[in-house]
Image (cartoon, rainbow, N blue to C red):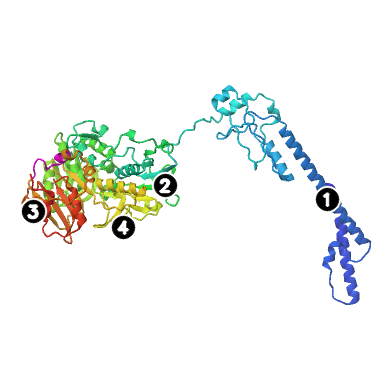
Amino acid sequence: MLTCRSVWKKLTPLARASSTLCRLNVRRAVLNNGGPVRVPAANMSIGPSGGGREKQVYVALVGAATLVGGVYTYRTVTSDQRRYKERLDDISSRPLNLSTHQTAVPLKESEPSASEATETAVEATETEPVAEPEPEAAPSPEEPIPLAPEAEAAAPTETTEPVPDEPVVEAAPPEEAAESPAAPVVEEVQTPAVDATPALPQVPSHAPYLLIGGGTASFAAARSIRARDPGAKVLIVTEESELPYMRPPLSKELWFSDDSSVTETLRFKQWNGKERSIYFQPPSFYIQAEELASAENGGVAVLSGRKVVHMDVRGNKVKLDDDTEISYDKCLIATGGVPRNLQAIERAGEEVMKRTTLFRKIDDFKSLDKVSREAKSITIIGGGFLGSELACALGRKSSESDLEVMQMFPEKGNMGKVLPEYLSNWTTEKVKKEGVQVIAEALVKSVTLKDDKLEIKLRDGRLVKTDHIVAAVGLEPNVDLAKSAGLEVDSDFGGFRVNAELQARSNIWVAGDAACFYDIRLGRRRVEHHDHAVVSGRLAGENMTGANKPYWHQSMFWSDLGPDVGYEAIGIVDSSLPTVGVFAKATAKDTPRAATEESGTGIRSESETEETAVSPVASSTPAPALEQQKDNYGKGVIFYLRDKVVVGIILWNVFNRMPVARKIIKDGEEHADLNEVAKLFNIHED
């Protein structure tokens, strides 16, 4: 190559001189003839025009350079091919290395170029002495090589299948091939510490049925899915550390238990004396999350203590708070809600928040039970179902200690937003008899901590001092996933808007407190009660397996102010609506305790939802005039009207009659005499 360059440097000045001489001759000839100057540029590359010694020299030099270049190229390619062949013969003649057991890679049919051969040889030279074994490869059937005993005990040696398109990888350098093969095998196997049986992942990467939320709606859906698809694999993801459980006993029966260890066992006696657990099913009912994928007959697994923070609707997958991703085929959102708090408490600072309970979960029950044993006074803010139930429970407990229990709310009486005023006032007196100091028409202005006491200042100037606050002011539906999932949230009622089949998007359903559904009789609604969670979850589970059923159910709810006073309600029960009440004298059978003795369960919706009202027979006992029992509201029926049509019913100390109430609302008829309608509930019979 250097010789060629030297020759070319010597020839270049001659070529340039010849070209210059050519141009001068042409120019001189034109001037002598008197014509325009035209330089024949096309002839400059082959020397001057015409004959002469200069042209012959030019042609000879160009021909010699071309010949020398061709000879050099031929010799270079031939030398590279010979060295490439010698390298392959050398590699194929070496013995196989025992640590890798890799077979030689067959060559391609086409002859590789010189550059490819050079790169392949360099790569083979730089290969590590011992290549890592691939755990998923199959042993080579052609040359089984016995292993050392210690290597065999650690992990089986396996051989990879040859890959035609990959370059040849050298098993080991020649100087290492003569060494003892057993020693490097043991050392190489122990270094990566590959287990023959890899550990199963704690979080399954895929779940055919993914249920987000671990409450009543999720459990009802899981049970429904398994009923229609016995081999279904269901995964429940919940933020709580607990298995699915029922929430109503947290504010009801658990507080009346005589067992001092109730916060640990979470077992309670119902009003009928029967004992049961707060959990829907024992741990043995579920399978481990890591076993879900391999479960032959499917099952229900609970992934507790994890939160879904993002949904990819198009990709059918979710992301957890630890960045783990789970794909799904069908998904249910049953995230429920989070307790609301007062802005006055939120502004008060961390110390006030530490002395405030937002009652919702098992941990809240345990912490409030502990506070009730240690504190001298507890104030409950809120006059609805939860606030009144906790007030009665703590009030009865205060009779056994020096605990002072107070309840404040902005209404005139307990459950003033639900019950008509006369019944709300009666309920307030009932709560007072339980040992609760009731502070009505109380609007909280500020909360401060002073002298180790919480000072609640009301807008009318009143000041209440207490050790602990329980805020029971409603529930905010949990719609955190709406933004990432692109789901619609109802601006009036909150919650995810769903169609008649409880479906929000393709392959996504919503049930429970977070679902805003359309009621064909009562319009769009969102319900926050146990029975709705049971029925909507059950229907969503059926639709996830292809049932395509609309949600026709009129859910009910119930509340007990101790074992002697309770009520069940259905439809729209709003004290701002016109109401008509029909009451009768109560008997010993007209109590929640007696109702559970008859039904066998304290969770009354679980028994009544299975019944269907069929042509109820009215009682023949004459009914008294409407609302003329004065202060004797032992038992009765309250009708809520809208445009003269019954849209809601409360059964006051009247139990196991909910199918009748449901049928009345479903019919949607006007009734001239509601006293006659009340006979359908047999309230006048002893």
Q: Amino acid at mark 3?
A: Glu
Q: Earlier in the sequence, mark 2 or mark 4?
A: 2
Q: Earlier in the sequence, mark 3 or mark 1?
A: 1
Tag nearer the camera, 3 or 4: 3
* Relative side of 112 to 506, left or right: right
Tag nearer the camera, 4 or 1: 1
Q: Nearer the viewer, residue 243 or 605?
A: 605
Q: CA distance from mark 2 to mark 4?
A: 29 Å
What is the x, y in percent for residue 26? Answer: 88, 69
Q: Earlier in the sequence, mark 4 or mark 1?
A: 1
Magenta region: which residues? 586-596
Residue 465 appearing in the image: no
Tag nearer the camera, 2 or 4: 2
Q: CA distance from mark 3 to mark 1?
A: 119 Å
Q: Amino acid at mark 4?
A: Ser
What is the x, y in percent for residue 512? Answer: 30, 48
Label annotation for residue 491: 4
* Relative side of 151 to 648, left or right: right
Question: Which residue is at a point 6% across and 54% down the rendered structure image?
Answer: 625
Above or below, 285 against 154 in this view is below
Q: Are the residues flagged by discs 2 and 1 in contact, CB closer than 8 Å?
A: no
Question: Which residue is at a point 44% across and 52% down the rendered structure image?
Answer: 314
Label annotation for residue 627: 3
Which residue is label 2 attached to?
329
Q: Are the residues flagged by discs 2 and 4 in contact, CB closer than 8 Å?
A: no
Q: CA distance from mark 2 to mark 1?
A: 67 Å
Label annotation for residue 384: none
Q: CA distance from mark 2 to mark 3?
A: 55 Å
Q: Nearer the viewer, residue 365 or 161?
A: 161
At numbered mark 3, what does the secondary structure look like: helix, strand or loop?
Answer: loop
Label annotation for residue 70: 1
